[in-house]
Structure formats: structure tokens, C-alpha cells
Amino acid sequence: MTFWVSRILALNVLVFFLIPRGSLVYLLCTLFPPALIGLDSGYFPALPFRPWTALTYMFLHANFSHLFFNMIGLFFFGPRLEYKLGGKRFLKFYIVSGLGGAIFSFLFSTASPVVGASAAVYGVLIGFAKYWPRENIYIWGVLPVEARWLVSALVAISLYSGISGSGGGVAHFAHLGGLAMGYGMLYWQDWRKLKGQREFQRKIFSDSVDSSDDSLKKRWSSIDLSAIHELNKLEIQRLLSRVQSEGVDSLSREEKAFLNRFSTD
């Protein structure tokens, strides 16, 4: 088991056995949607809004089966995702998914107080499905379902149950929040990575795009072939020969960038 998965799992188990359900500490750490603020303020009139519960609620559980199934999901899907993202990114991803569950619950849920790691675990599940969409997940150890279809089914069930009010006390909007925030965070990270790659490529090729033909020829003529490996030397000679016969425009952007790396300004 990986570093953060093991510690998150252990923390959830410790909290379950150390903080009794219904105790003052348990209530202080429970997330109450706006419709229940009246009930909440009956316990703590001076604290009608408790922002820390957006974090603490995800380490509380209503009963043992609630804890068990959440931790089973984290145990099976978490380690592989942590290996993929790295420890720090995985921890951030887990917490952000849980916060997404809190936000959705606060915005859309009015039925009951919210506790549990389900939103964070749903985020882990959608992360698993994003990177390994065709991986088979065996329901009850028997029925194989690809990760992408399992996540699609969970989204449909949570959406229908949340809108119809047939959740039976289950925080379906928290599940949707974890899924949405988890997917959004991974999409944003991929977009930033792609943007960085494009900026790097643009920086590499900028010299060859902005320079005139004469300045490029002058720069490339200064290349000291005596200090270059034989293979690179042959490629440089081939490209310079083409420039002499066909002009600078005969070279691709990559070929111009190759010559620029060996030239001096």
C-alpha cells in the first residue's frame, strides 16, 4: 500500500473508533446543509456556519458498513492512482475531491447532515477510470465491468437519486461533487501540462521564425564543426548544403531549430 493511501485509511479507522457517533465532537465536525442550519444552530448557536466541516466531514462515518465500503474503494483504487500522480498530487487530489462533495452538498442537498469519505473516494474512482478506462473492475468479485462504464453508471445513479429525492439518506450530491471536482482537477492539470509543452516548443522555434534568411545563413555559417560529434556534423552539412541550393525555406521548423542549437549569435 502506498504512503498516503495507508495513512488516509488509518486516519478514517481511528476517527471511527475514537469519536462516537452523536458526540459533541462528531457534531462539530459534521457538515450541515443550509436547510438544516436551524437544527445545527440549536446545538451551537454561536457557530451557525462552520467552514472546517468541509474538510472534517470526510473523515467521519455513520456506521461500520459506511466506513468499510469507502475504505475498500480507497484500498483497491487509491494506490495505483497515487503511483500515477505522485504522493503530494494524490493527497491534493483526494482532498479537493472531498471538498467538491462538500460544495455540492451545501449547494444542492437539503435532506440530512453529510459525513463520509465517499466524495473523495468517488474522485479517486474517476481518476482511475480516466487513466485506465478499459480496466475491468469485478463487481462483488464476479461481474467484470470496465472502469469507464462503472463510473458512468455511478454518475447516472447519483444524478437520478439526487434529483428525484430517492436517495434514502445517501448524500448523492456529495458523490457528484467528488466526481466533478476530481475530473475537473485532472483536466486542469492536463491542460497546464499541454500548455507548458506548447510554450516550450514555441520558445525553441521562435528564433527560426523571427529571423531573416540572411541572418540565419550568417548564424549557421558560424557553426564550429570541429567540436561536434560526427553524426551531428554530417546532418549539419547536409542541411547547410540544402540551404545553399534550395534556400532557408526548404528546411522545416525542426531542422532550423536543430541548426540553431549548434550556432552562435
Image (cartoon, rainbow, N blue to C red):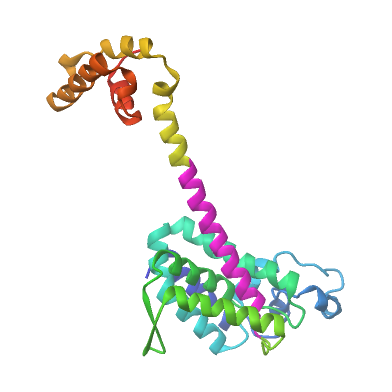
Can residue 157 be seen here? The reply is yes
In the rendered image, which quarter contains the N terminus? bottom left
Of residues 179 and 98, the one drawn nearer to the viewer in this rendering? 179
Give the percent coordinates (x, y) of residue 67.
54, 83
Lateral position of residue 260 relative to residue 131, left or right: left
* Magenta stretch prevailing secondary structure: helix
Can residue 117 be seen here? The reply is no
Give the quarter of the image for residue 206.
Answer: top left
Give the percent coordinates (x, y) of residue 143.
38, 88
Give the percent coordinates (x, y) of residue 217.
31, 12
In the image, farthest residue toward the left: 230
Give the quarter of the image for residue 101.
Answer: bottom right
Identified at 28% across, 22% down, the residue is 259
Is 191 rendered above or below residue 8?
Answer: above
* Magenta-span inclusion, residue 48: no
Q: What stretch is highlighted in magenta?
A: 170-195
Lateral position of residue 263 relative to residue 91, left or right: left
Is 169 rendered above or below residue 54?
Answer: below
Identified at 57% across, 69% down, the residue is 179
Lateral position of residue 85 relative to residue 228, left or right: right
Identified at 41% across, 69% down, the residue is 133
Of residues 158 and 9, the one drawn nearer to the viewer in this rendering? 158
Of residues 142 and 240, the one drawn nearer to the viewer in this rendering? 240
Give the percent coordinates (x, y) of residue 254.
32, 31
Is 106 rendered above or below residue 166?
Answer: above
In the image, farthest residue toward the front: 246
